Amino acid sequence: MTIENIPQQVENSTKLETQAVVERPEAKNGALLSIQDLRVWFELRRFGFGNAGYVHAVDGVDFDLGHGEAIAIVGESGCGKSSLMKTILGLNIPTKGKVSFEDTDLTTLDTKAWRWYRSQVGYVQQDPYGALAPFMSVERILNEPMIINGIKNKEKRTERIHKVMAEVKMFPVDDFLTKFPHMLSGGQQQRVVIARAMILEPKIIVADEPVSMLDASVRVEILKLLRGLQETHNLAVIYITHDLSTVRYFSERIFVMYAGKLIEKGNVDDLLGNPKHPYTLALLAATPEPDYQNALTFKEIPAGEPPSLVNPPAGCRFHPRCPYIIKRLCDVEVPPDFQIEPGHTAACWLHKDAGTQS
Ligand code: SF4
C-alpha cells in the first residue's frame, strides 16, 4: 500500500482540512496544555512475571503551558525530560495524574481524537537524519502527514508544502522537494523536520534537543528559525535541552528537572539571574562560557551522578550530592515548592523561611 492509498476509514473519519475530529469543550482555565501531578513509572520485571519495582521516570510534575508561550525543560541525561516529552506526545501512558489539552483529558480521547491531537502537536526530533525516512523524498515526507489526516486535495497539499518550505527557508523549494535526506546537510535535514512538524498547523511544537546534533555554526540559525515560527504563528513551544546557554534566547520560562521532578521554575530572567536551587547553580556552573580565560580555571560543581530512578533517595533527591544539605531534614522530608517571588519557585529546604509554600 502506498501513502496515496490511505484506508477508507481514515478518509471518512477526517475532514478536508486539519480540523478537529472530536467535539471538545472550550478551554476554561486559558491553558493550552495542563499537566497535573503527572507520574510515569515503568515496571521492571524479574524472570517470568515477578515485579522487580518501577523506574520513577516522571514523579509528580505540574505545569501549565499558555497559548504562544515558549518554555524550556532543562536537566541532565536521565532526569526524565524525554519521558515527560513522550507522555505529552501521547507515546507514554501516565501512571497517575493528568495531561489535558484545551481542557480535554488525553486519557479520554478515542482513536480519531488521538489523530486530531497529534495534528495539534508537532515534534522536532534530536537526530534529523534518523527522523527522516531515507527512502522518501522531501515532498513525500511532507505529504504524508496531510494524507494521513485526510487532506485529499493534492493542490492544497502542494500549496501548503511550498508555503512551509518557504517558512523554513529552503530555497529554491522545487529543487529541495525532489531530494532525499542523504542529499541534505544536517541543518537542511533539521529544517525539513521542522517543516514536517509545522505542516498540519499545530498549536504546540515539542522540540527535543533540536540543535544538539548540529554543527555549532548552524545551531543559532535553527534556534532563530524556531523562534521566528513561534512568534509568527503564536505557537507554544516546549524546548527540551540539557544546555542552559541556549534557553535564554528561546524561552519565557524555564523548568529545571532532576530525578523525575521539576525542582525550580521561573521566568528566564529570574531563574538565570537569581537561581535558588543548588542543582540549578550546579547546572549554571557547568555551562561553558566563550571566554578564553576559562581555559585555565576549574569550576566547582557537585560531585556524583544522578540517582537511580528505581530507588530514588528519600527526602530531597539531590541530597546525596548537595553541598548545602541540612541533615535529618533534607534526607528525610521531600521539600515542597517554596515561592521565592511571584512565578519563581524552588523545591529546596534552604528557602523554607524566605518563601511561601506554593
Ligand atoms: Fe540541598 Fe537540602 Fe535544598 Fe535538597 S533541599 S537542594 S539537599 S539544601
Image (cartoon, grey):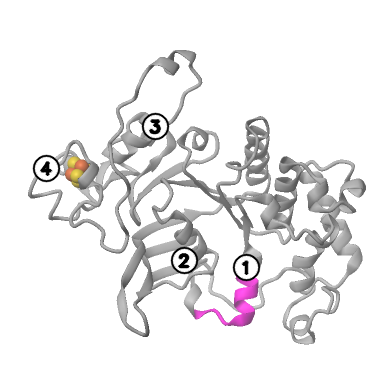
Identified at 87% across, 57% down, the residue is 159
**CA distance for labels 2 and 1:** 21 Å
Is the residue under label 3 in contact with that under label 1 (CB below 8 Å)? no
Mark 1 element type = helix
Badge 4 amino acid: Ile
Identified at 75% across, 86% down, the residue is 9
The location of residue 333, given as percent across then percent down, is: 14, 55
For disc 2, the neighbor class at 10 Å (few under 14, some 14 to 19, many from 20) is: few
Outermost residue on the top side: it is 293
Q: Give the residue at mark 3.
A: 286
The location of residue 256, given as percent across then percent down, is: 38, 45
For disc 3, the neighbor class at 10 Å (few under 14, some 14 to 19, many from 20) is: some
Residue 110: within the magenta?
Answer: yes
The location of residue 121, given as percent across then percent down, is: 61, 61
Query: Which quadrant is home to the N terminus?
Result: bottom right
The location of residue 224, given as percent across then percent down, is: 65, 36
Mark linked to residue 118: 1
Mark linked to residue 28: 2
Specify whether 200 is left or right of 203.
right
Q: Nearer the viewer, mark 2 or mark 1?
A: 1
**CA distance for labels 2 and 3:** 41 Å
Which of the marked residues, 1 or 3, is nearer the chain's N terminus? Answer: 1
Which of the marked residues, 2 or 4, is nearer the chain's N terminus? Answer: 2
Mark linked to residue 326: 4
Specify whether 302 is left or right of 153.
left
**CA distance for labels 4 and 1:** 45 Å
Specify whether 171 is left or right of 308.
right
Q: Which residues are magenta?
A: 108-117
Ligand 1 is in which quadrant of the figure? Answer: top left
**CA distance for labels 2 and 4:** 42 Å
Which of the marked residues, 2 or 1, is nearer the chain's N terminus? Answer: 2
